[in-house]
């Protein structure tokens, strides 16, 4: 079952209408944005995220992400793992659930994508802490 199989339009609309989202919501959706767009500059803000989320094909793109493209992005995977899944405030299911039930499915999607590609990278990519948390 795909992590986004049961996401509803209502949940996507909830994310679209957040002007100042809770920190964990913003962080999860930043990871979604980064994985979908694979930008050359890894810095992003909420406006970048919203530009991705409001696209008509957003959910279709997320459900059919090209893992071969992600596998070519060692720098991106390393950045995402170290910034969002390690350190003092890593993304966790409990933190995300507390912030927004609508974003839990997106969190599951990000973890599934990262966990799916991480074994293909050398162990130095992502760091030990993030690897432990994700796998």
Image (cartoon, grey):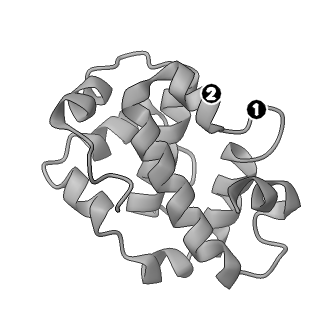
Q: Position of residue 113 (x, y in %)?
A: 51, 65
Residue 71 shows in this picture = yes
**Vertical position of residue 87 compared to residue 3: above or below:** above
- Label 2 sits on a secondary structure element that is helix
**Residue of label 1:** 89
Which mark sits nearer the N-terminus, 1 or 2?
1
**Vertical position of residue 133 compared to residue 131: above or below:** above
**Vertical position of residue 39 compared to residue 107: above or below:** below
- Label 1 sits on a secondary structure element that is loop
Circle 1 crowding by C-alpha within 10 Å: few under 14, some 14–19, many from 20: few
**CB within 8 Å, label 1 to label 2:** yes
Residue 41 shows in this picture = no
Q: Position of residue 27 (x, y in %)?
A: 55, 36
Q: Nearer the viewer, residue 29 or 9?
A: 9
Tell me if 50 is positioned left or right of 132 in this view.
left
Tell me if 15 is positioned left or right of 124 in this view.
left
Image quadrant for the N terminus? bottom left
In percent of the image, x 21 and y 40: which residue is there? 54
Q: Nearer the viewer, residue 46 or 122?
A: 122
Q: Which mark is residue 95?
A: 2
Q: Quadrant for residue 129, please give it.
A: bottom right
What's the CA distance linking mark 1 and mark 2? 9 Å
Q: Nearer the viewer, mark 1 or mark 2?
A: 2
């Amino acid at each position: 079952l795909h992590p986004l199989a049961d996401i509803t339009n209502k949940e996507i609309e909830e994310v679209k209408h957040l002007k100042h989202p809770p920190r964990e919501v913003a962080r999860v959706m930043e990871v979604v944005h980064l994985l979908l767009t694979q930008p050359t500059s890894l810095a992003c803000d909420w406006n970048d995220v919203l530009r991705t989320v409001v696209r008509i094909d957003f959910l279709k793109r997320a459900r059919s992400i090209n893992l071969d493209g992600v596998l070519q992005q060692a720098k991106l995977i390393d950045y995402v793992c170290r910034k969002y899944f390690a350190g003092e405030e890593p993304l966790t299911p409990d933190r995300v659930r507390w912030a927004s039930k609508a974003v839990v499915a997106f969190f599951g999607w990000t973890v599934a994508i990262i966990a799916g590609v991480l074994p293909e990278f050398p162990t130095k990519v992502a760091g030990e802490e993030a690897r432990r948390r994700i796998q």
